[in-house]
Amino acid sequence: MEFSKCEEQCLDRVLTHRRDVRGNNFLNKKISDKKIKKILLAGLKAPSVGYSQPWRFKLIKSKKKREKIYKNFKKEYKKSQKHFSNPLYHELKLEGIKESYLNIAVFYKKPKGKILGQTSQKKMGEYSVVCAVQNMWLMARALNIGIGWVSILRAKKVKKVLNVGKEYQLVAYLCVGYVKEFLDEPELKRLEWEREMFLDEVML
């Protein structure tokens, strides 16, 4: 299998225009089951250590469950404020738990035995799940669907709300939906929260 220059450019465009979407940008618009399945299948195509495929997905549409998770976000967000003196932090809309069409919790299933490639670096399985999340994010963007990753959550609380067993570890909580717009550049870059780093700066 070889790809054309056009396909290479298309992939680069998707990578370049992927965005972390906030709650103030989601639309109240249904996503078809076919497109949701495409996003999930993209996750399955990710690389995984020892071909372990340790990712597990939980779809959350229930308003009641999302409300409980949102309350945990508000609690954790309030605690996080003490770490940031930048006044912008208090103005940012950091999640879309209630506004998005769908929430997806992505878990790592802990292995019962030894996994090829994971005996020395124990977290390689979790990194494999992150690869799945990236695949899902890129497929969603190619479908003109936005994803926001909410990390200001207490994992144990999320698992309790979703009734997920101890053999699963929360890796990502994603808000998924159509959006008003995809920003030309990342929001935190535009707000000068951090500046963009260039290739020569990240080379060791």
Image: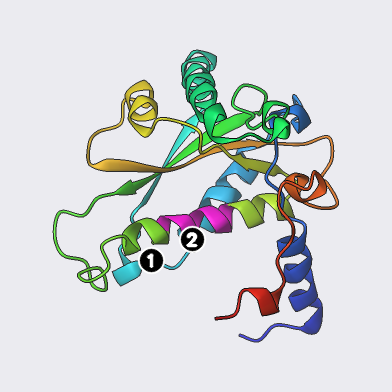
Name which residue type carries label 2.
Answer: Cys
Instruction: Identify which residue, 32 or 74, lies in the foreground.
Output: 74
Q: Which residue is mark 1?
A: 48
Query: Picture coordinates of residue 100 (x, y %)?
Result: 66, 29
Task: Report the label total.
Answer: 2
Which numbered marker is on residue 131?
2
Question: Residue shown at 70%/66% (left/top)?
Answer: 197
Query: Picture coordinates of residue 63 (x, y %)?
Result: 54, 15
Query: Pointers 2 and 1 in contact (CB under 8 A)?
Result: yes
Q: How is the image coloured?
A: rainbow
Residue 97 against residue 179 in the figure, above or below = above
In the rendered image, the residue lying farthest to the top is 64
Query: Picture coordinates of residue 172 (x, y %)?
Result: 47, 43
Q: Judge whether residue 130 is colored magenta.
A: yes
Instruction: Write the start and end of the magenta stretch as one range.
Output: 129-136
Give the structural element (helix, strand or loop) at label 1.
loop
